Amino acid sequence: MPEKDIAKRVRVLASDVRWETPSGNVRIDVLGLDADGRLVVGVVVVDDDPSQVLSRAMTQAASASRLETQTLAEMHARHLRRMGQHIDEDVAAHRLVVHTGHALDPLKLAQTRMVLFTEHITPALGTTVVWLDEMGLDIALQRLQAYEAGDQALLIVSRAFPPEPMTEFERIRPRHLRPVTPLNPEFTAGPASSEH
């Protein structure tokens, strides 16, 4: 999803969402709705350990995939009220339908997309995201860059993966693999034959 299309295609439903379940507390950093009717979970990366980052991202995406349409409308209404727009759940639900152009499909909502927002992309995180993408998981990386302009702070968000064109991430995975030559020739032989 190109960065120039994010604001146009994805409507933010809620941010810093927290609720309790029988299995524990749940948190979603940013929850959005794509124009194609799929949920988008935005995860703010605060550490460089890919296992922790991706575990948190997948947990948030899985939690979002179980949300019902009415729950999404309630979350969006609360989000808008915090921003000063005093609307009820029915109006919020209608806005979601207008955004997608059709009634929300629970099956499509369950196909959650993941977007990781990070300032630094380590080779380990980049390699893991590339592999998950190749395995069919809908995941993307967005790079955050903070600047100061006078007395104002600017936050620039740019797409890192999938890149266009493939550059940085092509270098962190092998393109041509050579067969490994065993150090001991006997390992290349078939099953050992018994001597009589």
Image (spheres, rainbow, N blue to C red):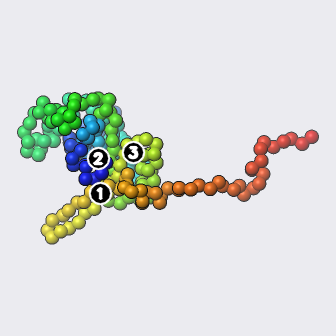
The answer to the question of whether label 3 and label 2 lie on touching residues, with beta carbons closer than 8 A, is no
Residue at the spot x=41%, y=56% of the render? 166
The Cα atoms of the two marked residues, 1 and 2, are separated by 14 Å
Lower sequence index among marks 1 and 2: 2
In this figure, which residue is indicated by the disc labeled 3? Answer: 55
Report which quarter residue 153 is drawn in.
bottom left
Lower sequence index among marks 3 and 1: 3
Instruction: Examine the rendering and report whether any part of residue 118 can be seen.
Output: no
Query: Between tags 1 and 2, which lies in front?
Result: 1
- Label 3 is placed on what type of residue? Ser
Query: Helix, strand or loop at disc 2?
Result: strand
Query: Helix, strand or loop at disc 1?
Result: strand
In this figure, which residue is indicated by the disc labeled 2? Answer: 42
Q: Residues within 10 Å of mark 3 (few under 14, many from 20)?
A: few
Query: Between tags 3 and 1, which lies in front?
Result: 1
Above or below, 120 relative to 36: below
Does 190 sit left or right of 145 as displayed?
Answer: right
Q: Residues within 10 Å of mark 2 (few under 14, many from 20)?
A: many
Does 69 sit left or right of 129 as displayed?
Answer: left
Q: How many marks?
A: 3
Residue at the spot x=16%, y=41% of the render? 79
Residue 123, image x and y in percent?
44, 58
- Label 1 is placed on what type of residue? Ser
The Cα atoms of the two marked residues, 3 and 1, are separated by 23 Å
Residue at the spot x=65%, y=54% of the render? 179
Residue 74, image x and y in percent?
17, 34
Q: Nearer the viewer, residue 27 or 133?
A: 133
Q: Which labelled disc corresponds to residue 158?
A: 1
Lower sequence index among marks 3 and 2: 2
